[in-house]
Amino acid sequence: MKNFTEREKAFEAEFKRQELMFRVTARRNRLFGLRAAAQLDVPAEEAEVYAKTVVAADFEAPGDADIVKKVLTDFEEKGVAVTEAQLRAELAVAAAEAHRQLAGC
């Protein structure tokens, strides 16, 4: 019975870890979207809507390429010069901020 209890605790801990990683990724994408909206001069009342489109873009394919591509395309359409490397660096900053914000949860 002790083995079963230990296994149950291990599964619960893994579930909590995965849930936190999902929340951090979603928060990261939102923060990334808000920063991109500011650089695109999206009005403040529409920035949250834009950030949600960035979050939704992450569900298109595994990895970060889909959100980077979405934001890069949006920058190109607005004539804002930015490289993929710059966006990935900004994504890393957003990830650190998201982790900091949610670490206490």
Image: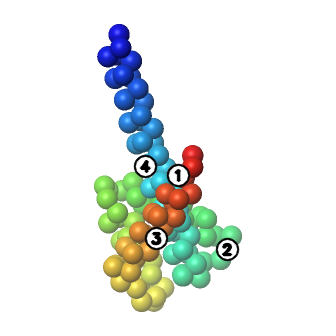
Q: Looking at the image, tell me whether mark 1 or mark 4 is earlier in sequence order.
A: 4
Please rate how many residues cluster around mark 1, counting C-alpha atoms within 10 Å: few if below 14, some from 14 to 19, many from 20. Answer: few
Asked if residue 63 lies left or right of residue 55, the reply is left
50 is higher (above) or lower (below) than 105: below
Residues marked 3 and 2 touching at CB (< 8 Å): no
Asked if residue 60 lies left or right of residue 39, the reply is left
- Hey, what amino acid is under mark 3? Val
Q: Which mark is residue 93?
A: 3
In front: label 3 or label 2: 3
Residue at the extreme top: 1
Mark 2 sits on what residue? 44
Residues marked 2 and 4 touching at CB (< 8 Å): no
Q: CA distance from mark 2 to mark 1?
A: 27 Å
Q: Which mark is residue 21?
A: 4
Residue at the extreme front: 2
Q: CA distance from mark 2 to mark 4?
A: 28 Å
- Residue 58 versus residue 18: which sits nearer the camera? 18
60 is higher (above) or lower (below) than 5: below
Residue 20: horizontal and vertical position, in percent?
47, 46
Q: Which mark is residue 103?
A: 1
9 is higher (above) or lower (below) than 68: above
Residue 23: horizontal and vertical position, in percent?
49, 50
- Hey, what amino acid is under mark 2? Ala
Q: CA distance from mark 3 to mark 1?
A: 15 Å
- Hey, what amino acid is under mark 1? Ala
- Hey, what amino acid is under mark 4? Met
In front: label 2 or label 1: 1
Residues marked 2 and 1 touching at CB (< 8 Å): no
